[in-house]
Image (cartoon, rainbow, N blue to C red):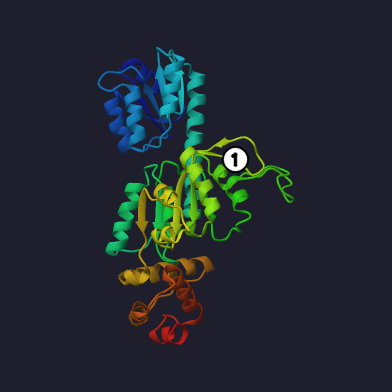
Amino acid sequence: MKVLIVDDERAIRYSLKEILEMENYQVDTAENGEEGLQKAEKEKYDAIFCDIKMPVMDGTEMLSKLMEAGVESPVVMVSGHADITTAVDCIKKGAFDFIEKPLDLNRILITLKNATDKATLVKETKILKKKIYGKEMVGASESVAHLKDMIGKVAPTQASVLITGPNGSGKELVAQSIYQLSQRSMMPFVEVNCAAIPSELIDSELFGHKKGSFTSAIRDHKGKFEQADGGTIFLDEIGDMSLAAQAKVLRVLQERKLTPVGGDKEITVDVRVIAATNKNLQEEIVKGTFREDLYHRLSVIVLRVPALDERKDDIPLLIDHFSEQICSESGKPVRTFTPEAVTLLQERSWPGNIRELRNVVERLLILGGNPISGADVQDYVF
């Protein structure tokens, strides 16, 4: 375990360093916030002890800059002039804990253990989420490069995002990428397929219901918005949502409040909304099937996912990716495609986009030879 101690008092730095090294921690030191920030950005520390009152850059400023830089190490603030206001302010800014001088050995060791346990838990959670959400956006075409650049800019903000593009093009993957790169990535990501929920159940699914509010309501139920509190909700196929449901979603976005079906108390929620559709919502507004005010709420940022026919240069990369993925899932050696087979697949039209290509690659891996040839493509695709 590696720890950084940031304190302008040399005696404290070295006494704390000696104590922690006796407990088998690897320790670095810095005499002010500026030096500490530089070290924390270069090295990965399991915990950082940071004094508040320091020259050059004080501890609270260093803490703010650590948070801005995305440093994930737990930060324990230390002060000889502690008060409740300062402690609360540090915790609000992202500190893991706050301890007072003179330092108590047992308190230091307990705090350090808790901090490192938290860091381990965060790391394990990220690994687990990567397994669940970690599908890679594959492609080197100009349109995909632009989309990745936009995701990188949009993700750290709190802005609502509307993702457009044809079915099977990867809109859900874009939503997951935004979530994973956002400041809400440790909070829930709740997906809702608006087209799959019957209109009579949409209110209950989105906003929840109270026991007894209708015949089958045998217990209280949290809606998707409440489940996503503090995190992100992904409203897929938003263009298929009824006008009545749209009005209620608009209210949640405007007021950050909702009322469950059969309830009489408002619930406050903090949710980032990402929506997706394969429809042209501006045309739907003209038809009267989509609310213009909701469109403007959702479309702070609009990201368009290109159809596969617009990025055929990416098909060889996608074939390799899907072949490796499918063979790995089935526990079989990775199979290759001949240049002729790849060329034939590039020349084909893909109305079902990425989803259709993956299905075709899987079919060829099951039915084709090794390597998969042009003849296999002719036999099983065309």
Q: Is residue 147 above or below residue 184?
A: below
Q: Residue at x 44, y 49 (%)?
A: 294
Instruction: Provide residue 363's location: percent of width, then percent of height.
Output: 49, 77
The quadrant holding residue 377 is bottom left
Tag 1 secondary structure: loop
Is residue 100 found left or right of 68 in the rendered image? right
Amino acid type shown at disc 1: Thr
| Relative image position of residue 134 (x, y in whole percent) | 45, 55
Q: Is residue 347 left or right of residue 193?
A: left
Residue indicated by mark 1: 259
Q: Nearer the viewer, residue 105 or 171?
A: 171
**In which image quadrant can residue 268 be found?**
top right
Residue closest to the eye, 247 or 196? 247
The answer to whether 280 appears left or right of 264 in the picture is: left
Q: Nearer the viewer, residue 168 or 110?
A: 168
Q: Position of residue 347 (x, y in %)?
A: 34, 80
The residue shown at (29%, 59%) is 145
Q: Quadrant of the N terminus?
A: top left
| Quadrant in which the C terminus appears | bottom left
Q: Is residue 187 visible?
A: no
Q: Residue at x 57, y 47 (%)?
A: 224
